[in-house]
Amino acid sequence: MLREEEIKQCEPPEGFGLDTEGTNPKFDAQVHLQLEKPTRRVILQDLGYSDDHCEKLSTTFAQTNCFRVLSTKGMEALAAEIDRIEDYACESARIPRVLRGGTFRSRFISDLCKSPDLTAFVSVIAGTELIPHPMEIMNGHINLAPQDKTRSVDRWHRDTTPFVLVLFCTPPQAYDGGNFEYFTGTVAEAEALLRAGHALPSERCCTVGEQLDGSAVLQQGSEVYHRARKVTRGDRRTTFVQSFVPTNPLAREACWRLSDTYNGVDPIHVLLPDWARYRCWYASQICTHWLMTHTANANGGVDAAVVAARDALRTASHRLPYTPTVRC
């Protein structure tokens, strides 16, 4: 079997680049992580989802309360890296100040997002094996406080990535407002209320505990309707979002169509190859599942072909080059 570490990664896309001077922090899981289990774990049935709906997913896990993820040194290093690349932030249709492609711009952020220790930890909490999202543009997403305090940090939505770790990066005493909230109901119920012109009932909009810097919430974001409220005091309120996908290829996907995940700010020359990478990875998982669940072919010919296809797809998911910018 082709091992992940044997696959050479392709170069960052045009317009992006990791720090090369060697003066920025190097991620060390032993120093920068402080993984402490959450004390609350909500399942999807608690939000009103049926058992039939949940059976199509990789897990019934919905969300946690805030729990510790980074050490003091880890939070200091991440905050410094966010400060260094903050000028790349822009406005999307949904989020007033967002920075995409964090793993392309910071080696520390890239190594944090792909930490085996962190991935294994969140997999246990979720109750299913997860990996960092194969679409690199989905990793290391950063939300910043809007300069216009009449606007929310992020409006009500569901995620197009299945699982997200939302890491709070600003000390809570530095700002007022900016609460992370989730709706205690299904996505379909929330969207129906909003389409009808109703506000979501305040008694069904819950917070996740004190948003200490270095703490995080893990949730199956495609199934939990959530938002971040307005910041009423302070100029800083930063969250760092890492996306994960389940390795189970039979679980219903959070996003089937590229158009559903396009936010208007991700460069097309990054988004299209990343989507192709993701589909290659997904197809490789289908091959792996087939090999694990089917009896070996008498002459081995079919199995060998599936193994070759799986390895070629997995290699493509890592090495498919980013296309150059096309100007019309």
Image: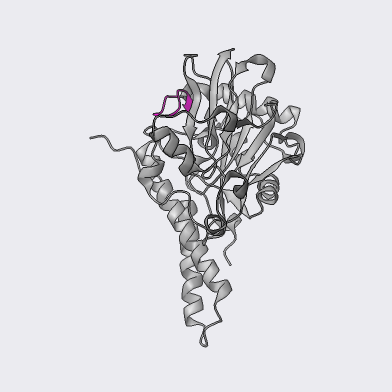
- Please, what is the dominant secondary structure of the magenta stretch? loop
Picture coordinates of residue 162, whole percent (x, y): 53, 47
Q: Residue furthest left?
A: 328
Looking at the image, is 85 positioned above or below residue 120? Answer: above
Is residue 20 something one can see in this rendering?
Answer: yes
Report the span colored magenta.
Answer: 90-100
Quarter assignment of residue 239: top right
Q: Is 14 colored magenta in this rendering?
A: no
Is residue 107 something one can see in this rendering?
Answer: no
Q: Residue furthest bottom?
A: 298
Quarter assignment of residue 247: bottom right
- Name the residue rendered at 69%, 50% in the picture: 120
Name the residue nearer the viewer: 306 or 51: 51
- Name the residue rendered at 48%, 27% in the picture: 98
Quarter holding the N terminus?
bottom right
Compared across the picture, whether 165 is left or right of 311 comes to right
Name the residue nearer the viewer: 183 or 259: 183
Picture coordinates of residue 182, whole percent (x, y): 57, 34
Compared across the picture, whether 155 is left or right of 264 comes to right
- Name the residue rendered at 45%, 27% in the picture: 95
- Name the residue rendered at 52%, 22% in the picture: 86
Q: How many marks?
A: 0
Q: Is 98 colored magenta in this rendering?
A: yes
